[in-house]
Amino acid sequence: MATYVEETTYVRSGMYNWEGDAWSFDKKGPYIELVTSPNNPDGTIRETVVNRPDDEEAKVIHDFAYYWPHYTPITRRQDHDIMLFTFSKITGHAGSRIGWALVKDKEVAKKMVGYIIVNSIGVSKESQVRTAKILNVLKETCKSESESENFFKYGREMMKDRWEKLREVVKESDAFTLPKYPEAFCNYFGKSLESYPAFAWLGTKEETDLASELRRHKVLCRAGERCGSDKKHVRVSMLSREDDFNAFLERLANMKAH
Amino acid sequence: MATYVEETTYVRSGMYNWEGDAWSFDKKGPYIELVTSPNNPDGTIRETVVNRPDDEEAKVIHDFAYYWPHYTPITRRQDHDIMLFTFSKITGHAGSRIGWALVKDKEVAKKMVGYIIVNSIGVSKESQVRTAKILNVLKETCKSESESENFFKYGREMMKDRWEKLREVVKESDAFTLPKYPEAFCNYFGKSLESYPAFAWLGTKEETDLASELRRHKVLCRAGERCGSDKKHVRVSMLSREDDFNAFLERLANMKAH
């Protein structure tokens, strides 16, 4: 019975509203800003844009779901008040439904734990056990210099290879666009590196509904409009299985002929 | 970004309020009644009490978390609009955080799926795989007549043994009370059986704060007040490990001496 009471109170919370894009936020009073860096869908590195460091009622949450060295240069040790991480994107184990947070304010951390308790009592023990095991294996592989054994080196080469192939097709076609990412020094790899995001933010040079166009060529992706953008952009996964990715490249290459 | 929008909308829902005990509910208009049967904490069999079968806006949710043959006689094939089940109480795998529902109305089922998607996207795959495996093994054991091999027979004997020991201590002490449960015909076992609930709803005959009294004797339990009852009752788990359960019996037996 106690659980039902809490659950009811919990979903009734009217304490906050979604205010839209942080770039256009100019209201006074308390707010929470979500910084997704690298950003989904376009893979760009983001910083706070509302930026009111002296406002004690301001909260910034950094979502570092994609901040891993196979996707993006690890340029610095991040040091923010609330930092979210997930097991989903490191290794593709999204189905384990597990993540973690680094939080400086003890009271905020307590509230987050309280939320989890009301939301689901806790994360599945099976997921916890399996994730801990995989993270440990991952850590062990980091000791290796070998590209086939070191998980992040392997992942980076894989992502690099896919991005290079995709950029080649896009260049050949002259119908599409892809974002360019600045090189940056990666502290994990100890050298300057490019970004190879988990999603390609694909655009078209023509005045067309790109998602529908791609669907006609049997390529499924998320329409730009669903990502807060326009019809000329789509989000394509760069993490599909090898066969699927190659089929995607082939179909995309065929589209210029039409 | 899409997820954050939905999450925000979801926790803002002010669509329903907790109205307290169904016995005292007399408001007009739409309502949702939760029937927990067997009931936690007292193990009694419950039916709807608001009982407005002709009210199209009325919804009844039956929670059958404890409706398993090692706890209670399975008196009939339940046939209600919304029936909830959990893997937690059959085998004690609460940590897997997994349950299921039987729902007649397709639209209600869709909303429940929608809730899960916003709440957690879905249940951990590790839990799904492990639970499916365990349920299958459980089903296989049901073919056996052996008390050590048939899971529910084994569980029932275990519960019976513990309840008999507890009732013996309570009888000897003359300081405590326990509920009595009617015998009923169990379709699973094919005979008339008693209930052996997962929790003992322990009461005291004296005017005392039972939870505090027990804590002084190193017995931890949930206070009756936290279960919507009074200080003279507590909820004690009957599912602890063998050593813990025996220590509980011993400490309870010692309490009469004080």
Image (cartoon, coloured by chain):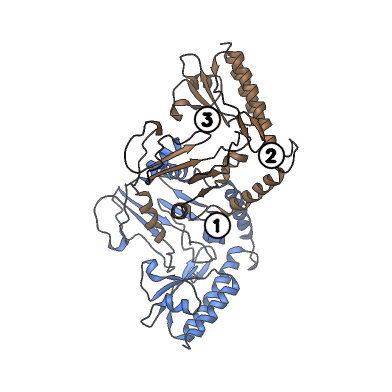
Chain colours: A brown, B blue
> Measured from the top left, where is residue A62 in percent x and y?
49, 41
Which residue is label 1 attached to? B95
Q: Amino acid at mark 2?
A: Phe
Labels 3 and 2: the sequence-earlier one: 3
**What subunit carries mark 3?**
A
Q: Is residue B189 left or right of residue B50?
A: right
Image depth: mark 3 or mark 1 in front: 3
Which residue is label 3 attached to? A44
User: Alpha-carbon distance for marks 1 and 2?
Assistant: 30 Å
> Measured from the top left, where is residue A50 in percent x and y?
40, 36
Check the picture and name the quadrant holding the C terminus of chain A.
Answer: top right
Check the picture and name the quadrant holding the N terminus of chain A.
Answer: bottom left
Circles 3 and 1: CB atoms closer than 8 Å: no
Q: From this viewpoint, which residue is outermost toward the bottom?
A: B257
The quadrant where residue B35 appears: bottom left
Q: Is residue A239 left or right of residue A2?
A: right
**What subunit carries mark 1?**
B
Q: Which residues are magenta?
A: A37-47
Q: Secondary structure at mark 2?
A: helix
Q: From this viewpoint, which residue is outermost toward the top?
A: A257
